[in-house]
């Protein structure tokens, strides 16, 4: 009965905040801010799951609004919101972590379409997992690995549009991962993660994945439209070679540079070069 009453309250509240899917009210932003604050400060897993369900209800309605590409929440620290420079793709992400160590990523891709009056919405969720993201395969909507994306750029492969995404994964308690991903869509508008596009000098992979100590930090960023620069990772000591939970930056930089249709790995680059 309580759940039904909440749904009725939510419908009335949200309907008053969004008129015909066109207006995003400040009340929505304030309510989401309160929910995220409760999510961070509540230590009961059952309560956290219920709070997250409420957040997802709000985001479900938000992503179908007419102003989703022009509006941005300015006060939500724990909600990722990024839009591509070509204004054709927007990504919204957040993660839920429980006290038992389990976690889930939630992600929405909002894609503008050329032939339809409404956007295409893709809703994904991915459970935390300790195993690394594979670099030798594609992923789809049904088996998405889960990550938080924080930047993206549009590109084209054989005249087909795609977007390069930068993301981070906290699924392993001992190892953090950063990811360079390629997002594209099939002619039927199905979502695809990965392209054979990353040349390490030994292999050509579908994506680039970097692993380092969970208590460390790694920089991974677009240096220009044709260069992605990142920290070079090394073990803390020679005896820890190969054990990625003991890796961190050594204050030098590497890069993937777009050359002749491939992102090619370059070691020891000058990261001071500006776009």
Image (spheres, rainbow, N blue to C red):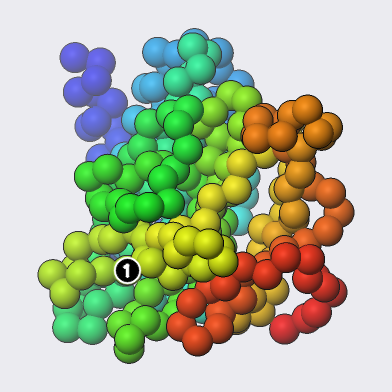
Q: Residue at x 24, y 20 (%)?
A: 3
Q: Position of residue 184 (x, y in %)?
A: 32, 68
Q: Position of residue 34 (x, y in %)?
A: 54, 34
Q: Is residue 195 left or right of residue 131?
A: left
Q: Is residue 197 left or right of residue 5?
A: right
Q: Is residue 28 placed above or below 189 in the rendered structure? A: above
**Residue 156 or 115: which is nearer the viewer?**
156
Q: Residues within 10 Å of mark 1 (few under 14, many from 20)?
A: many
Q: Is residue 261 placed above or below 69 in the rendered structure? A: below
State how many labels appear.
Answer: 1
Q: Quadrant of the C terminus?
A: bottom right
Q: Is residue 173 left or right of residue 171?
A: right
Q: Is residue 119 visible?
A: yes
**Residue 13 or 219: which is nearer the viewer?**
219
Q: Is residue 188 left or right of residue 200?
A: left
The residue that mark 1 highlights is: 184
Quadrant of residue 37 within the rendered picture: top right
Q: Position of residue 139 (x, y in %)?
A: 30, 51
Q: Is residue 213 placed above or below 274 in the rendered structure? A: above
- Where disc 1 sits, the SS reads strand
Q: Is residue 139 placed above or below 53 in the rendered structure? A: below
């Amino acid at each position: 009965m309580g759940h039904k009453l909440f749904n009725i309250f939510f419908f009335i509240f949200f309907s008053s905040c969004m008129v015909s899917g066109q207006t995003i009210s400040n009340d929505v932003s304030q309510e989401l801010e309160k929910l995220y604050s409760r999510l961070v400060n509540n230590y009961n897993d059952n309560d956290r799951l219920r709070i997250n369900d409420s957040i997802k209800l709000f985001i479900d309605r938000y992503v179908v609004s007419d102003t989703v590409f022009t509006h941005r929440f300015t006060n939500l620290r724990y909600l990722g919101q990024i839009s591509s420079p070509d204004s054709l793709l927007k990504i919204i992400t957040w993660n839920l972590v429980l006290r038992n160590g389990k976690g889930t990523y939630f992600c929405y891709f909002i894609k503008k379409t050329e032939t339809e009056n409404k956007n295409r919405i893709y809703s994904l969720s991915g459970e935390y997992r300790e195993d690394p993201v594979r670099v030798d395969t594609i992923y789809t909507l049904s088996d998405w690995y889960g990550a938080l994306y924080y930047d993206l750029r549009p590109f084209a492969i054989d005249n087909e549009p795609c977007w390069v995404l930068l993301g981070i994964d906290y699924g392993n308690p001992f190892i953090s991962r950063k990811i360079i991903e390629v997002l594209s869509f099939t002619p039927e508008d199905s979502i695809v993660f990965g392209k054979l596009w990353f040349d390490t000098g030994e292999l050509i992979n579908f994506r680039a994945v970097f692993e380092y100590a969970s208590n460390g930090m790694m920089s991974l960023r677009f240096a220009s439209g044709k260069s992605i620069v990142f920290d070079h990772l090394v073990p803390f000591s020679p005896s820890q070679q190969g054990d990625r939970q003991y890796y961190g930056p050594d204050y030098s930089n590497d890069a993937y540079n777009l050359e002749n249709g491939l992102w090619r790995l370059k070691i020891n680059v000058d990261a001071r070069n500006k776009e």
